[in-house]
Amino acid sequence: MPFIEPTGVDGKTYDVIVVGSGAGGGQTAYTLTMDGARVLMLEAGRKYTPALETPMFQTPELAPLRGTDTPGKPFGFYDATVDGGWQVPGEPYTQTNSDTASRFDWWRARMLGGRTNHWGRISLRNGPYDFKPHARDGLGFDWPISYEDMAPYYDKVEMLVGVYGANDGLENTPNSPPGCLLPPPKPLVSDLLIADRSRKLGIPAIAGHRAVVTQPLDWKNIPAKLHPGNPTAQKLAADAMRSRAACLWATPCGRGCSIGANYQSVTVHLPPALASGKLDILTDAMVHEVTLDKAGRATGVNFIDKKSGRELHASARVVVLAASACESARILLNSKSASFPDGLANSSGKVGKYLMDTVGSGVDGQIPLLESLPPHNEDGASGLHMYTPWWLYQEQHAGKLGFARGYHIEFGGGRRMPGLETGAELEWLTGGSYGQQFKQDVRRYYGSFVYFAGRGEMIPNEHSYCEIDPAVKDKWGIPVLRFHWQWSEHETRQAAHMQKTFGQIIEAMGGRVREGVETDGAKAIHTGGSIIHEVGGAIMGHDAKSSVTNSWCQTWDVANLFITDGAPFPSNADKNPTLTIMANAWRVADHILERMRRKEI
Amino acid sequence: MDRRTTIKWVLAVAAAAPGMGDAARALEAVAAVANAPSGHGYGTDPDLLRVYKAGELWPLTFTAAQRRTAKVLCDLIIPADASSPSASEVGVVDFLDEWISAPYEAQRQDRATLLKGLAWLDSEAAARHGAGKSFVTLSNKQQTAICDDICYAPKAKQNLVAAANFFARYRDLTAGGFYTTPQGRKDVQYVGNVPLPRFDGPPLEVLKKVGLA
């Protein structure tokens, strides 16, 4: 079973339809097919083949406009995302208020593998506190599961996709069991300097965790741990692991990786799933509705074949939505029927509600100690060799900070491949030099800059949600989402704390802050959605009144309908959500398999 | 750009240019600004593996006279030295032309800034050194004297702030075009973008220099 044409779904009933092919959909399809379930994956974008399409060593002068970002390629020409970005032509979304403080910016990627193709690969486990935030401070919602429920799946995902990192044993920053993590890359000189000066301020700095294979995966031993008692799956996993090369320490991960050294759904989850013979993939298939039978059970999905514009139907015993938090909410809200006039699985009225992003704020600095260093290669793994996990849990718990949740710090520097920014906007350092002096100044300052990006937890609130716009439809005739957004003081104060802290670290390094520190958190905080960590919109919980799904991400209202992207997250820890999306998808897919074996669904 | 803005520019540039030749050049420049780029962008799914050249995706803008001015200014900002060639020698003028001709909003703004600025250089040359003089006909010393007055916006005289903002943007783009070439990368001694069997981190001499070894 392979990539199929739209007619290939006619007359078939699959075990499971998975809508979406990113981290959630990829992991769901992998887990299901490894255990023999017959799966149809529907992806709204085009087929994408990293081995043939990735610009691995291309340099900026080969690209239009030296590779700068444009509306068609908003993260730069060589970014892996195709047919995506903040806007997708013909597929709008709307805002009730487009001010930066009230807006939600939505990044989509209409391509096989979705946003896993370009993401930062930062892979942090949620800690025990992160599953029970309400119990800890009385705000937001607890997950109906605990860290102990998720831990075995974190182990499996780390082993399958390949995550580098170290076990530092810090508070709410879990260690991984032996054999899970790959060795982290050696820190850059800027990392070591930041770490040294941070520690003097009482701020830790430890090895980063990213889904990059720093040495060949242990294909002889890992498959048996992933798939005990299943030799077929073990062989498929081993073959897939052997086909991936280790990092060659060049070219940014955001371009994708033609040798499979980093995690992309397309290079890690989908090849073994396809090799199992159990997976059909249909691309350019825009799902907009889950269909029901008279008994209220999901029968499949309606989708638009984008190539012909025709509406088609695919059938399955179980439907799993993994189209991304907002897109899954959109599909539910657009699935209206007599029994669900407000959208499917929405008897609680909570579909689209409690949308969260990550709090983001950053400061750049220039460090004289890093000027004019002897040339050496600092490409490394292209991001986050080290980072700072949240370190003020106790102070925060004691109410000393004025905001309830923490953030981690992503930092870096280095002699990166020069870009359009390399010699730009140096006046604050050079006093406006040009000519010979300018060339000397650029040589001096190149590689002497550091950045600090705070990534913090947002608490879900009643004012941040999406709903169906009553008037606007996309070019396929599908009603679009309208967003509402509002930060609380927990987020804006956190952003102000980030700014102050980053200023202190730069000062402790003997450096200069570029553009100053912003003490007004409302100005320092990035626009909602812009960190591209959106979760929520169909949260899981303990009861059908206050949540959309149970602890198995099974909708309360429709027994054979599940959600495995970020939509069921009841909170959004500062830890980047992708690793948790994958671990949760594996956990849910295991449950679906069990229920199918018991003929319950 | 609306008609009112266009007329404002024509008047402003003509007022600053005493000779008819300069006014004509100014008009030509403003007309070029006013004509929106005619090409289309490369869309959302361009071929990432092929090599692109300026002028392939959308028509270019510079007249021969504008090219000459652009080249002189590029090389005042990044001249040749023992380490690397000048900006124009590595194709930065072509890059600037590609940039201001692009059918995207950010580049359209730079188009207005750069074309107005290049015209201003000529009108300033005429104002300082006599009608009929253009920026490229000035001596290096005279050119430098103009640049010195506009190379740092915070310290520019009130009537030169707009010109200084132009210069800042022009310098950013010239540097951007230059340091993204093989010669530019070599100039700053970037040694990456090559596959390595392992990543060793910073050498000892680097750690010693920052006091961490």
Image: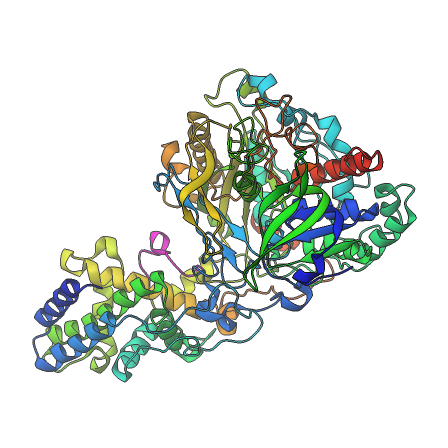
Would residue B30 be found to the left or right of residue B86 on screen? left
Colouring scheme applied when the structure was drawn: rainbow
Would residue A460 be found to the left or right of residue A148 on screen? left
- Res B129 quadrant in image: bottom left
Would residue A355 be found to the left or right of residue B158 on screen? right
- Res A297 quadrant in image: top right
Q: Which residues are magenta?
A: A421-433
* Total number of numbered discs in the rendering: 0
Closest to the observer, B32 or A170:
B32
Give x and y (percent) for residue A441.
Answer: 41, 60
Would residue A135 be found to the left or right of residue A166 on screen? left
Q: Is residue A567 above or below residue B176?
A: above
Decide if residue A187 is in sight here.
Answer: no
- Residue A431 lies within the magenta run: yes
Closest to the observer, B20 or A304:
A304
Give x and y (percent) for residue A264.
Answer: 67, 53
- Residue A443 lies within the magenta run: no
Decide if residue B102 is in sight here.
Answer: yes
Closest to the observer, A130 or A481:
A481
Give x and y (percent) for residue A139.
Answer: 53, 20
Q: On the rendered image, what quadrant is the N terminus of chain A found in?
A: bottom right
Q: On the rendered image, what quadrant is the C terminus of chain A found in?
A: top right
Q: Is residue A223 above or below residue A500?
A: below
Give x and y (percent) for residue A457.
Answer: 53, 31
The secondary structure that dominates the magenta segment is loop
Q: Residue at x 92, y 42 (%)?
A: A229
Toward the front, the furthest residue is: A294
